[in-house]
Image: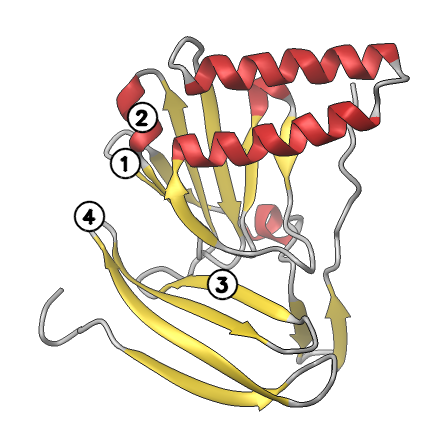
Amino acid sequence: MSEEAPCHSFVTRTSCPLCHEDLIINWQGDDIPYFGEVMHITSRCECGFRFADTLILAQSAPMRYELELESPDDLNSRVVRSTSGTIRIPELGIDVEPGSISESYVTNVEGVLDRILNVVMTATKWHVEEPEKHSLGLDIQQALRDAIDGHRKLTLVIEDPMGNSAIISERSKSRQLTPEEAEHLKTGMIVFDTSTSEMEVDACDQDHSITD
């Protein structure tokens, strides 16, 4: 990173939204090669409240990234998933939408697939007495394992109305979302609408389920 845009860290203080005690928020700058500067934000309260997010400082427009997984090298592509990012794997009908307790992370494509696999494994166990859904869960698990092993081609999509998520690869395709597309995406955060002076909470947490 250049001297004009150094990585930096600092802390701020606010009140915990749950217990109203003093809450320290840690801000840590980072420079991701081939992408730019990001800011990692974390906070944790003794009452149990915690928050984590990653802001991409070089991009704020609503964005869509798509990467076709065709080789083992694609599995190493870096992924920045913010709390407002929606992850999709169209071939398997998988949509991972943000909720009120979503956390951000920086990993690679393989790490994303592994996270999704763990969720599908849990959901499959919950449907053990429903043969069709249980069988579907097992099929999805195998498809994800095959992709992780480099034996199956899949497509990874990330859409973020806040522009804070990305797939960092020379092969990834990116475009700005239309206002209509961005409007229908979840954000997983509290949004204050200045035009109506009302507060809306996008709490789209859903039970892990398997649907046809």
Spatial CA distance of label 3 from label 2 is: 24 Å
Asked which secondary structure carries label 2, the reply is helix
The mark tally for this picture is 4
Which badge, 3 or 1, comes first in the chain's sequence? 3
Q: Amino acid at mark 3?
A: Asp
Tell me how far mark 3 sits from mark 1, CA to CA. 21 Å
Q: Residue 53, labelled with which disc?
A: 3
Whole-Å distance between the Cαs marked 1 and 4? 8 Å
Question: Mark 1: which amino acid?
Answer: Ser
Of pointers 2 and 1, the one earlier in the residue sequence = 2
Secondary structure at badge 4 equals: loop
Q: Vertically, is 45 above or below 158?
A: below
Q: Amino acid at mark 2?
A: Asp
**Numbered disc in front, either 3 or 4:** 3
User: Residue beneath label 2, please?
Assistant: 74
* Residue mark closest to the camera, 2 vs 4: 2
The tag on residue 169 is: 1
What residue is drawn where x is 64% and y is 64%? 189
Residue 87 versus residue 189 in the image, above or below: above
Q: Is residue 195 left or right of residue 1?
A: right
**Mark nearer the N terminus (3 vs 2):** 3
Q: Secondary structure at mark 1?
A: loop
Q: Which residue is mark 4?
A: 34
Q: What residue lies at 67% left-to-right and 48% top-to-bottom?
A: 184
Give x and y (percent) for residue 187: 62, 57
65 or 154: which is nearer to us?
Answer: 154
| Quadrant housing the C terminus | top right
Colour scheme used in the picture? Answer: secondary structure
